[in-house]
Amino acid sequence: MEQKGTLTVKRGLAQMLKGGVIMDVVTPEQAVIAQEAGAVAVMALERIPADIRAAGGVARMSNLELIRSIMDAVTIPVMAKVRIGHIGEAQVLQALGVDFIDESEVLTPADDKFHLAKNDYTTPFVCGARDLGEALRRIAEGAAMIRSKGEAGSGNIVEAVRHMRAIGDGIRELTVAPKEELVARARDLGAPLDLVTYVAENGKLPVVLFCAGGVSTPADASLMMQLGAEGIFVGSGIFKSNDPKAFSKAIVAATTHYDDPKAVVEASLSLGRDAAAMEGIDLRKIPESELLASRGA
Amino acid sequence: MAPRPQVGVLALQGDVDEHLAALERAGALGIAVKTRASLDACEALVVPGGESTTVIRLLDRFALADPVRERVRAGMPLWGTCMGMIVVSRAVAGLDQPTLGLLDVTVRRNAFGRQNDSAEVDLAIPVLGEPAFPAIFIRAPWIESAGPGVEVLATYGEHGVMVRQGNVLGTSFHPELTEDPRIHRYFLGMLAP
């Protein structure tokens, strides 16, 4: 008997990515650089978030020929993004055969009320979250992996820190909550009771939790792993730096040895004297209407 | 009570915690191995699931490849699951990918297909007896060819998916993602008494 697309194999792929770095790439050549540097997966995109932010307009699923050429270029898993709630794009990416689909606030939402019914798909999904309730809602819909939202393309880690701390605090609060409170907690979180109970009993999400949004340096990666991330998405941070090869290798090394400051020093020194991380944006200077993290809740 | 054996799980990347928990359930003391010092403390080593291109590079970058080879050639039991089996193999079919060369097999990566072909399978494994083992294949490799000293312990379709050569064990699938402790116990049984 053989069963495909089960919760176990979908969540399982995310488990295999733990301790690793997933990198945004916009060409097959960048995908190869990422793989050579030790990325555990790549996110195939037409434009990295910093450029999506700069371009404005409607951001959609990437060109399929581009995604396919990236799938052909590397042996590691390839992810691609769909607009929130876009059933058509999601079915197309599944049929194309990508390994993971990111239902992402970085693209312009297709549905301003509802996310995809992700349990219906064979391909696993990752979704962004800013707090525990949002994470559990996405898991209830079928997400096989959760990432912080951060503020994509900003080069600023503060939003990702806020989200990882909020998710961590939410989990810790449930682990010490008396049983009598769990139904009310589920109501307040806007999340199903079975998932709230799971978190209360196990002290963690039932799926893997990564950090995304604003990671630009080896020390950023170390920070997020220490805040409880099980791995790192790096979007604009690598290919908006002045030396993508060096930055990708250094961020991989710092993610593996995040708890050893000497190893993070080594990784940072490997960047050399002229290393320049991507330029960041003060989030207070981004107009409210252009903030990505508040899309989809 | 005899002291519990100390079994390392290579912790450069992958599903390390799942193996540590499964080893505990099987009666061992699990140690996450990221450094030479932690490797030296182990009596056996598991290379978990993950991405082989990532881990083989990190083994080199952090100078662990040769110490692992030396320990295994001196008799330390070694078990690779999925990515781990690729890392310990002799060669990867169709790819110029470095490996540790400790298990005399050629593996084919992503042999069953991409993620949409990942599957749960009830697998007959004669050395474990009944019932069938709940094998979880995730972008899994299979054994393309094996040297004469390699015993094939289970096949799925046409290809070997569980093999043993002396002190080295390989599985295409992920026993650490199940509650079934039989293969972890089998591996602990490979420790010298």
Image (cartoon, rainbow, N blue to C red):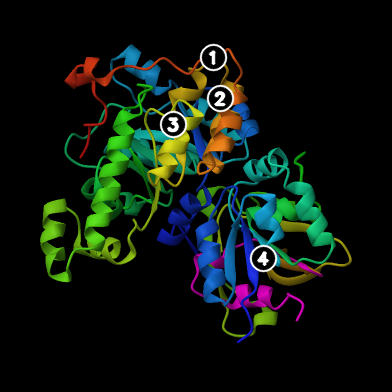
Residue under numbered circle 3: A220
Q: Of marks 2 and 1, which one's residue comes earlier in the chain?
A: 1
Residue nearest the viewer, comparing A96 with A262: A262
B167 within the magenta span: yes
Q: Amino acid at mark 1?
A: Asn
Query: Does residue A245 show up magenta in the picture?
Result: no
Q: Residues within 10 Å of mark 3 (few under 14, many from 20)?
A: many
- Range of magenta residues: B166-193
Mark 2, chain letter? A
Badge number at residue B157:
4
Residues at marks 1 and 3, common chain? yes
Q: Is residue B191 above or below residue A102?
A: below
Query: In whole angstroms, how far apart are the C-alphas of marks 2 and 1?
Result: 8 Å
Residue type marked 3: Asp
- Determine which of the numbered discs, if any, sits on residue A242 in the image: 1
Q: CA distance from mark 2 to mark 4?
A: 43 Å
Q: Say whether residue B172 is visible.
A: yes
Q: Are marks 2 and 1 in contact (CB under 8 Å)?
A: no
Residue in the image at 61% along x and 18% along y: A272
Query: Which amino acid does the dot numbered 4 rest on?
Result: Gly
* Chain at tag 4: B
Residue A247, label in figure: 2
Q: Which element is circle 1 on?
A: loop
Where residue B14 sits: x, y (%)? 55, 51
